[in-house]
Image: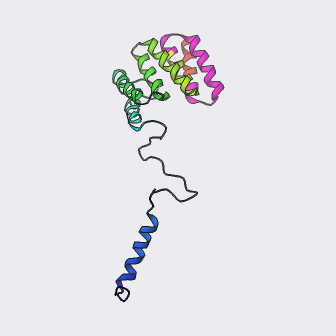
Amino acid sequence: MFSSSPIFPALLIPAFFLLSCAGPENTPPSGVSPQPDPHGFSSRYNQEAQKLFARARIMWDLEENCSDPELALEYLDAAIVLEENYAEAYMRRALAASETGEWESAFADSSRAIRLQPAADHYASRALIFIRQGNYLGAAKDLEQALRLDAGNPRTAEFLRRLERLKQ
């Protein structure tokens, strides 16, 4: 019945192609890496927490000054409620707190970020908080640790320059 129609074979080829490409799991073929999330979110943290972090993160300029620390604190508080081990959110919250003069919160959050993820960036950021507070000895110790972890870290180099200028 259908086999005598010239349209039937032409319809079978696209249908076969579509069926062979569709899979129940929509996974990439073997040996092909999965595509990253198009929004830039990782699977490491809750996506809503990452969105809140991103809203706060864009408030900082290249010199680590926040345009609206109070609003950043609100976003970061909410992100941490959703993801209690979000090291980057703790560090950003520490930086925002340091801009509002909340030194105890800034130190506690930056130390928590370092415990969660002892990275050169986190030590360098805590050093910046110490610099803002006027604690140059604490800043120097954290910058030394940051250098031990990653001697080529650009944030560490920048904060070392700041510290040297302030010490003169």
On the picture, is 121 further left or further right than 151? left
Q: Which of 51/130 is in front?
A: 51
Is residue 166 positioned above or below 14 on the image? above
Residue shown at the point (41%, 44%) measured from the top left? 39
Q: For the magenta stretch, what is the residue range?
A: 130-157
Is residue 167 positioned above or below 124 on the image? above
Residue 13 coordinates in the image, percent (x, y): 42, 76
Residue shown at the point (53%, 19%) measured from the top left? 111
Residue 3 can be seen in this image? yes
Of the 4 image quadrants, the one containing the C terminus is top right
Residue 168 can be seen in this image? no
Is residue 13 positioned above or below 86 on the image? below
Q: Which of 60/50 is in front?
A: 50
Residue shown at the point (41%, 13%) measured from the top left? 102
Direction front: furthest residue: 1
Residue 41 coordinates in the image, percent (x, y): 44, 41
On the picture, is 65 further left or further right than 152? left
Residue 57 coordinates in the image, percent (x, y): 41, 30
Direction bottom: furthest residue: 4
How are the residues colored? rainbow
What is the chief secondary structure element of the magenta stretch? helix
Of the 4 image quadrants, the one containing the N terminus is bottom left
Q: Quadrant of residue 143?
A: top right
Q: Which of 27/166 is in front?
A: 27
